[in-house]
Amino acid sequence: MDKQLIINTNPAETRVALLEKERLAELFIERRRERGLVGNIYLGTVMRVLPGMQAAFINIGVDRTAFLYGGDVLDPDTLREQKLESGKGLEDLSPEELKERNYKQRKPIEKLLREGQQIVVQVAKEPLGTKGARVTMFLSVPGRYLVMMPDFTHIGISRRIDDPEQRQNLTALIKEIKPDTVGVIVRTAAAQVDPVLLQKDLKFLLKIWRLVEATRRRAASPALLYRDLDLILKTTRDLYADDVDKIVIDDATAFEELKRFLIATIPGAAKKLELYQDPTPIFDVYGVEMDIGKALSSRIELPSGGYLIIDQTEALTSFDVNTGKYVGQASAQDTILKTNLEAVSKVVSQLRLRNIGGIIVIDLIDMERPEDKERVYIALQEELKVDKARTNVLRISELGLVQMTRKRTSESLERQLMEPCPCCEGRGHIRSTETEAYDLLREIRRHTLQTGLKAITVKVRDDIRHWIEVEERELFQNLVREFQLKVEFKPTELTTKALQQAPYEVESN
């Protein structure tokens, strides 16, 4: 698969686009006013412990207190037992499985934390909506090839490395080079690299952790102990692979910084780095701006003529699959199967591009043949292999629904770039002209009864005035006669057309 990393940066905003076959696959945005917190390590203070929720609120020195779930609290006694068990079944446990193991054995949160206590935590999820950041006491420091976990001693291998012999060789190698006091997870990028690079990566991570510990000893809570890499370096570190053809960036200073980073961490990657210097905006040249516009639409077209309708809410995102104008050339079942296969491919691409997380429901077109359902389910699983976010997918239900979850660590693209409509309050619909007209007539009646005044001036939109004077003229005249009113309509600046107009116009003098 041809891949390109296109980076647009200025003092106010940084955007990193991953292109696959010249189409936007993933987009990362960081604004100077809202720099990301995920990966940062803080010395925080426990503000409140909630036994009923098995959670706590932690002051880490940002606008909103962070949320610490009971399953993310490190129990020293359980940790000690796990360290004694090192080498006895812990090697292939992921950080999530280690937390699950810790959660089952740990004490209640009120016996582990107390108000005013200082603890070291790491941000696992960005603040979402009105919620503060979610933090964990399971610390990890990621590198290009390895992730170092200072509180564990186990060795974990990425599940994307599925060759048993390769997994065994990597485990043996890490056992030789890592200290007994830390745990290490081998990332997918380490599968075929020189062992010297793994040793170099681990040495760098251990150096970072020593700096964190030194800062911790002299810091007063709340304090930032470690800030993760900025967006450009972090996304390049995590997204770069051998199939990336080039990395293009449009800022000279950022270019030099990224070049030094690539030379130090990823052999050969610096040769693919290019500085973009043309006056035309880089995202325009590579078609990214157009793809971003499409990514904010609620309707996504499918290749054969079907389409998806995407509806995002606070807790759930739904994908509704429709055949649209596609009628097929064979049987109805074949038409439905082809539409559903196209749909699951497009759903996964939209999950990645829009950074959609949480609960996801895909409403497929009903399939009668069990083999068709199985084929669509397998196709969905295959498409998800390219998605780095952790997912959990249930089989297609009797109602033709796919229920799944996708790990969310930051706001979706929609929430980053859009805000709720002040007219419809984010519901996606506004009150009809007819409804507003009847409400106005009721308000005129209410106002007359309360004030006793007979002369009334009403500032109203043209469409509402037209409805009252034309469509409901008789009803309006009855109201005027009943109260002997003199009603004067005046235009208001607000019109429904104004809501559809562009927020700005750029013209030459």
Image (spheres, grey):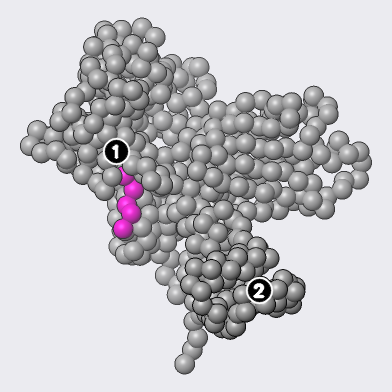
Q: Is residue 292 visible?
A: no
Residue range highlighted in magenta: 33-37
Secondary-structure class at tag 1: strand
Give the labeled residue for mark 1.
Answer: 66
Q: Residue furthest right?
A: 330
**In the image, residue 264 lies in the stretch drawn in magenta:** no
Q: Residue furthest left?
A: 218
The answer to which of 476 and 424 lies nearer the viewer is 476
Q: Amino acid at mark 1?
A: Ala
In front: label 2 or label 1: 2
The local secondary structure at tag 2 comes to helix
In this picture, is 361 found above or below 277? above
In this view of the protein, which residue sits in the foreground, 213 or 351? Answer: 351
Which of the 4 quarters of the picture holds residue 347?
top right
Determine which quarter of the picture holds residue 189. top left
Q: Position of residue 431 (x, y in %)?
A: 62, 61
Q: CA distance from mark 2 to mark 1?
A: 60 Å
Q: Residue at x 62, y 41 (%)?
A: 318
- Which class describes the residues within 10 Å of circle 2: few (<14), some (14-19), or many (20+)? few
Image quadrant in which the N terminus is located:
top right
- How many other residues sit within 10 Å of disc 1, few (<14), some (14-19) or many (≥20)? many
Residue 241: percent from left, percent from top: 47, 42
Q: Position of residue 505 (x, y in %)?
A: 51, 80
Residue at the extreme bottom of the image, as rendered? 509
At x 57% / y 71%, what residue is drawn? 444
Pointer 2: what residue? 482
Q: Would you say residue 190 is visible in this rendering?
A: yes
In the rendered image of this protein, does residue 283 appear above or below residue 232? below
User: Relative to 103, is 350 on the left or the right?
Assistant: right
Q: Position of residue 263 (x, y in %)?
A: 32, 47
User: How many circles with numbers are drawn on the protein?
Assistant: 2
